[in-house]
Image: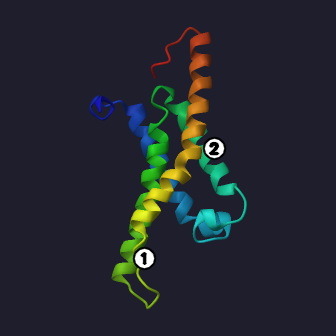
């Protein structure tokens, strides 16, 4: 809990970039993946992108590698909630999606590749920093 209170700008920046990236993945899903939901596209492209984002965010904040994937999750969930609200207030006969809780649970699983990527990147970044004589507490 201290992380949120100590004002560590790197952690906040990592979280914000993760949240923005998670939101953009869903916003541009039809363009990037050819499907409204990224995991509906064939193959592992969505999971590879999420893993790659985790790697980048893990390097940004190796001591708190988990913060970037949390941001990715929040960004994706924000898009889901915004889509749900849109469907509630602009009902066009297509039905209202009441699967937000189920989607939130599935997003946890879909964000695990980002956590794995961030963990691996943080381990490598810490070793590089320690080899250079620096501190791994960044």
Residue shown at 39% from the left, 64% from the top: 101
Q: Position of residue 31 (x, y in %)?
A: 64, 67
Which mark, residue 52?
A: 2
Question: Is residue 19 in view?
Answer: yes
Q: Which image quadrant for residue 52?
A: top right
Question: Is residue 17 in view?
Answer: no
| Comes first in the chain, label 1 or label 2 | 2
Q: Secondary structure at mark 2?
A: helix
Q: Secondary structure at mark 1?
A: loop
User: What is the count of numbered marks?
Assistant: 2
Q: CA distance from mark 1 to mark 2?
A: 30 Å
- The answer to whether 96 is drawn above or below residue 73 in the figure is below
Q: Nearer the viewer, residue 103 or 21?
A: 103
Residue shown at 53% from the left, 12% from the top: 134
Q: Position of residue 20 (x, y in %)?
A: 47, 52
Q: Nearer the viewer, residue 9 or 78?
A: 78
Residue shown at 39% from the left, 68% from the top: 82
Which mark, residue 111?
A: none
**Residue 42 horizontal side relative to residue 3, left or right:** right
Other residues around mark 2 within 10 Å, as few (<14) / some (14–19) / many (≥20): some
Residue shown at 62% from the left, 18% from the top: 128
- The answer to whether 134 is drawn above or below residue 14 in the figure is above
Q: Quadrant of the N terminus?
A: top left
Q: Nearer the viewer, mark 1 or mark 2?
A: 1
Colouring scheme applied when the structure was drawn: rainbow
Pick out the residue farthest to the bottom. 93
- The answer to whether 28 is drawn above or below residue 91 in the figure is above
Q: Position of residue 103 (x, y in %)?
A: 46, 63
Find disc 1 in the rendering and name its residue: 97
User: Tags 1 and 2 in contact by the CB under 8 Å rule?
Assistant: no
Pick out the residue farthest to the top. 133
Pick out the residue farthest to the left. 5
């Amino acid at each position: 809990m201290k992380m949120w209170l100590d004002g560590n700008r790197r952690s906040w920046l990592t979280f914000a970039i993760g949240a923005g990236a998670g939101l953009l993945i869903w916003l541009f899903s039809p363009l990037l993946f050819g499907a409204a939901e990224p995991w509906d596209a064939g193959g592992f492209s969505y999971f590879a992108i999420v893993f790659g984002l985790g790697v980048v965010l893990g390097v940004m904040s190796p001591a708190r590698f988990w913060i970037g994937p949390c941001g990715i999750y929040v960004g994706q969930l924000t898009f889901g909630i915004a889509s749900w609200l849109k469907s509630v207030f602009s009902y066009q006969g297509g039905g209202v999606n009441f699967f937000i809780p189920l989607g939130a649970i599935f997003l946890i699983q879909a964000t695990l590749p980002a956590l794995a990527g961030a963990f691996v990147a943080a381990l490598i970044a810490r070793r590089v920093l320690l080899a250079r004589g620096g501190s791994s507490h960044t």
